[in-house]
Image (cartoon, rainbow, N blue to C red):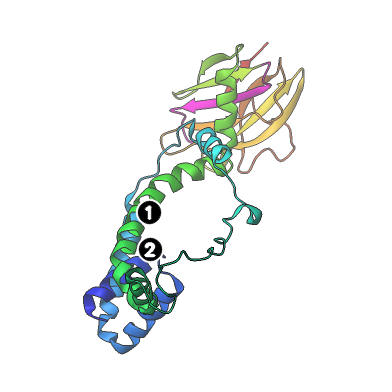
């Protein structure tokens, strides 16, 4: 095997596109020519760079439906549907060549069968490398959108989408002490509510914001609410029911030690 043939196999191997025969030929050649290890290292780095160069993108809304539709329309074949072996040839007509006399086509077939499998694989290595490169580009482009389809989504984002798509979607905004504002997005029919804050000041030292559902005169803690560096946050009001109010208080670090608000709320938003 010359170096060019090895480079073609190495490129395909970096993309996991070698057959077992090619893998054996690759390993043998590398053992005989350890100086070619640099080629293998370069191909691995290139494959890794291609994967890292693609930015994550939001999946198209119709991607999953299109994939499932394609699967449903693709014929699936079982073992019973595979092609049957060719039927035995009938009697040869008079004047035909004797079976002992090979025809030109038979010579070509025998020559093809006599060719070593590994040698044939070298000839196809360039095609494997080209196909594998194309497969990687397509795979990287599709893998990240599929990841968004198949993996669980952020529950806050899911709830906000449900609210915004509901016919009775409503919002209410209040100003926060020290600047910024908080907007509650809710839907009674979806029984979902999400509080979105912008420009909210960081809580005082050793203190935390805590979010509450107020149902009648009973406060229900939804836990500590922390903001980002820009003062923004979005919190799902888990267990929201129509008519609930949401309130934010300033509590000890980690939340109220009593399970009840210990300060007056800095923001209250009613939904009734």
Q: Is there any visible trace of residue 36 in the rendered image?
A: yes
**Tally of numbered discs:** 2
As for residue 245 lying within the magenta part, the answer is no
Residue identified by numbered label 2: 15
Q: Which region shows up in magenta? A: 188-202
Q: Which quadrant is the N terminus positioned in?
A: bottom left
The residue nearer to you, when weighing 51 against 36, is 36
Please, which residue is most extreme toward the front here?
Answer: 94
Please, which residue is most extreme toward the bottom here?
Answer: 32
x then y, percent, for residue 146: 49, 43
Residue identified by numbered label 1: 135
Q: Secondary structure at mark 1?
A: helix
Q: Is residue 198 above or below residue 100?
A: above
Q: Is residue 266 above or below residue 87?
A: above
Q: CA distance from mark 2 to mark 1?
A: 9 Å
x then y, percent, for residue 173: 52, 16
Q: Residues within 10 Å of mark 2 (few under 14, many from 20)?
A: many
The residue nearer to you, when weighing 14 against 89, is 89
x then y, percent, for residue 204: 51, 37
In the rendered structure, are the residues bearing label 2 and label 1 in contact, judged by CB atoms less than 8 Å apart? yes
Q: Is residue 228 left or right of residue 130?
A: right
């Amino acid at each position: 095997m010359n170096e060019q043939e090895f480079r073609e196999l190495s490129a395909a191997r970096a993309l996991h596109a070698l057959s077992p025969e090619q893998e054996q030929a690759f390993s043998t050649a590398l053992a005989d020519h350890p100086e070619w290890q640099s080629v293998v290292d370069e191909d691995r780095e290139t494959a890794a760079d291609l994967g890292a160069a693609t930015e994550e993108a939001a999946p198209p809304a119709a991607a999953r439906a299109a994939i499932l539709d394609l699967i449903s329309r693709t014929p699936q074949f079982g073992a019973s549907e595979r092609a049957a072996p060719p039927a035995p040839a009938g009697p040869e007509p008079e004047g035909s060549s004797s079976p002992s006399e090979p025809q030109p086509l038979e010579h070509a077939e025998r020559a093809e069968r006599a060719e070593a499998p590994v040698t044939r694989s070298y000839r196809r290595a360039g095609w494997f490398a080209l196909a594998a490169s194309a497969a990687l580009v397509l795979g990287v482009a599709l893998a990240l959108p599929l990841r968004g389809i198949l993996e669980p989504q952020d529950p806050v984002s899911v709830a906000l989408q449900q609210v915004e798509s509901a016919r009775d979607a409503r919002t209410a905004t209040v100003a926060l002490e020290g600047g910024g504002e908080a907007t509650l997005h809710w839907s009674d029919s979806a029984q979902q509510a999400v509080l979105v804050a912008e420009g909210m000041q960081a809580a005082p030292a050793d203190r935390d914001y805590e979010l509450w559902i107020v149902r009648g005169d009973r406060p229900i803690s939804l836990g500590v609410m922390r903001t980002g560096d820009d003062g923004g946050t979005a919190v799902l009001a888990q267990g929201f029911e129509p008519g609930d109010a949401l309130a934010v208080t300033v509590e000890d670090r980690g939340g109220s030690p009593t399970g009840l608000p210990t300060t007056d709320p800095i923001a209250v938003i009613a939904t009734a």
